[in-house]
Image: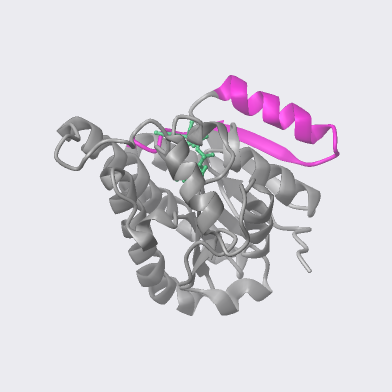
Amino acid sequence: MTDLTERRIVITGAAGGLGRDIARTCAAKGASLVLSDLDQDALNAVQAELAETGATVETLTADLGDPESIVAFGKAVGGPVHGLINNGAIATGIGGIGFEEIPIDSWDKVMTVNVRGTWLMIRALAPALRASGSGRIVNLASDTALWGAPNLMSYISSKGAIIAMTRGLARELGPDKVGVTAIAPGILTTPSTEYVPEARHTLYETGRAVPGPQGTGEVADVAAYLCTVPAITLTGQVMPVDHGFVFN
Ligand SMILES: NC(=O)c1ccc[n+]([C@@H]2O[C@H](COP(=O)([O-])OP(=O)(O)OC[C@H]3O[C@@H](n4cnc5c(N)ncnc54)[C@H](O)[C@@H]3O)[C@@H](O)[C@H]2O)c1
């Protein structure tokens, strides 16, 4: 069902966690990849792993907090680009704090990287996505923005913005046959959630329609599918991929 052969896909935040697993899945489905993150050495390790499977993988650092870095990245990537998976974000170490206690600079950094960075990355790659004739943008949101998770205000606000951006961009880019979707996972068993209190993990594990913990596999599968040609029909949709913790 998911065939990504002859599709060139850019994945941000691909040095570890969910982004690396999305890269593994897309490579297994035949995509050629451009992997990005802050740390070139970590990207090189992912590239080496995937190259052993025969995948074509380019790597290039870009700082989602730095507009010039993103513009330079877009130029270096060139075109065409068939998929852009906006996975890179500040996703850890910012929760467990009430909304009145968030330092201003922490709030600004989350918004700058997660929201502005995603917008600028899409802007930088829009010509290459249009040029492919079937560009797909997949934005990583979070189901925390849908159910209103407490004590995570900067993060859920940034992911709420990603959901709104997805919907508006679907209409702006639809005439160019570029599809834009968002995935809203629940809490996953990634290193980024190890700091989250046990009570929040338990809330998810007992509250899912399919109870228990969730790994990255299904999220990566859905992200890969959303980069296919037929996935254009889903443009504008926000998909919780969380074993039924929230229904959208
Ligand atoms: N893990 C979860 O439970 C979960 C749940 C819902 C949504 N998500 C989303 O999935 C995505 C991946 O999450 P993860 O759990 O793998 O987190 P993670 O922290 O392991 O990965 C995020 C990646 O983004 C990169 N990044 C951070 N700031 C950057 C910057 N300024 N420029 C470029 N790259 C930068 C990091 O280096 C890291 O590799 C995020 O968008 C996150 O919000 C994760």
Determine the image quadrant of residue 3. bottom right
- Lateral position of residue 127 relative to residue 35, left or right: left
Q: Quadrant of the C terminus?
A: bottom left
**Residue at x-position 50% and y-position 43%:** 201
Q: Residue furthest top?
A: 41
**Colour scheme employed for the rendering of this structure:** one colour
Residue 71 in sight here: yes
Q: Is residue 218 left or right of residue 79?
A: right
User: Where is residue 162 drawn, in percent x and y?
Assistant: 37, 57
Question: At which x and y percent is residue 26?
Answer: 71, 51
* Drawn side of residue 154 relative to residue 7, left or right: left
Q: Could you say which quadrant of the image residue 107 lies in? A: top left
Whether residue 85 is visible here, answered yes or no, is: no
Q: Is residue 55 magenta?
A: yes
Q: Position of residue 50 (x, y in %)?
A: 77, 35
Instruction: Look at the image and give the residue range highlighted in magenta.
Output: 40-66
Q: Verify whether residue 37 appears in magenta.
A: no
Residue 16 location in percent, x, y? 59, 32
User: 236 and 157: which one is in front?
Assistant: 157
Q: Is residue 223 above or below residue 35?
A: below
The foreground one among 82 and 146 is: 146
Q: In the drawing, does residue 26 fall left or right of residue 127?
A: right
Q: Residue at x 40, y 76 (%)?
A: 171
Taking the spot 76% from the left edge, 64% from the top edge, the residue there is 2
User: In this figure, what is the number of numbered marks?
Assistant: 0
Query: Residue visible at 69% across and 50% down?
Result: 217
